[in-house]
Amino acid sequence: MSGSPVEAVICDIGNVLIEWQPERFYDREFGEARRRAMFAAVDLHAMNDRIDQGEVFRDVVYATADACPDHAEAIRMWHDRWLELAAPVIEHSVRLLRALRANGVKVHALTNFGVESFALAQENFDFLNEFDLTFVSGHMKVIKPAPAIYERVTERLGLPGNAILFTDDRAANIAAAEAMGWRTHLFDGPEGWARRLVGEGLLNEEQAA
């Protein structure tokens, strides 16, 4: 790793600290065939992008449901049963977050998340209240991987890019961070992230377990 020290760690949330696989929820509820038909007919991830950009959670979901009566009941579940979509917690990642902070490392969140859905998540997942700073796209009105969101975070932290270590599960988000000069880790499970944190000298092996 680079010889200069990491002064701040930035974590994505979805698929890093909390699994985010809406398709899995709908497969359980309706079966894969019906889920595939619904996702082919309605771009639910684009709907969610609107929420992540700051539009009102319930309004967007219910308007989408009203426009797609064949799938309306299932679409409304995106709002009404959202906590079942955002599950389970990735416990090892939460331990790593807490171990970093116990070591005095500044740990921030940078997440594509709606205003209302993030507030709901904070009520139900205590670790989401433990970051030093939390950058939520819904409040910022811009989502990853737009360069502007990384620029605003860099400015707020007042750190050079190589002092920041960022983890995210999406390659496009990682590439945008690298373009800002940040150090990055493409998250594909907490074990690899733990090894990276040990390699950077931020945790020891016992703390990373």
Image: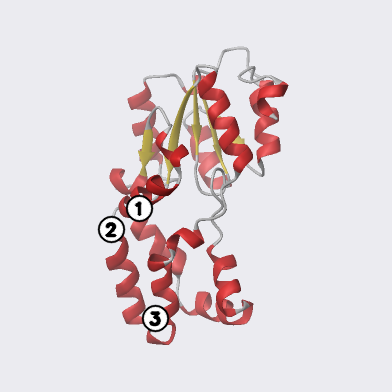
Q: CA distance from mark 1 to mark 3?
A: 21 Å
Q: Find residue 13 and report its horizontal and vertical position in percent.
A: 49, 44
**Between discs 3 and 2, the one toward the N terminus:** 2
Query: What is the total number of numbered labels drawn onto the structure image?
Result: 3
Mark 3 or mark 2: which is in front?
3
Q: Amino acid at mark 3?
A: Ala
User: In the rendered structure, which amino acid carries the disc numbered 1?
Assistant: Gly
Precedes in sequence: disc 1 or disc 3: 3
| Pointer 1 residue | 114
Which quadrant does the C terminus fall into? top right
Helix, strand or loop status at disc 1: loop
| Residue at (30, 65) in percent of width and height | 58
Residue under circle 2?
Answer: 55
Residue, far bottom: 70
Quadrant of image for the N terminus: top right
Q: Given contact means CB atoms under 8 Å apart, are the residues at marks 2 and 1 in contact?
A: yes
Residue 124 in the image: x percent, y percent?
42, 49
Q: Which residue is located at x 55 percent, y 72 percent?
A: 26
Name the disc covering residue 72, or none.
3
State the residue in front, 38 or 29: 29
Q: Please indicate whether residue 17 sits to the left or right of residue 61 in the image.
A: right
Kindly state the secondary structure of the residue where label 3 is placed: helix
Alpha carbon distance from label 3 to label 2 = 19 Å
Q: Quick one: label 3, few (<14), some, or many (20+) residues within 10 Å? A: some
Mark 2 packing: few (<14 Cα in 10 Å), some, or many (20+)? some
Check contact, mark 3 vs mark 2: CB within 8 A: no
Amino acid carrying label 2: it is Glu
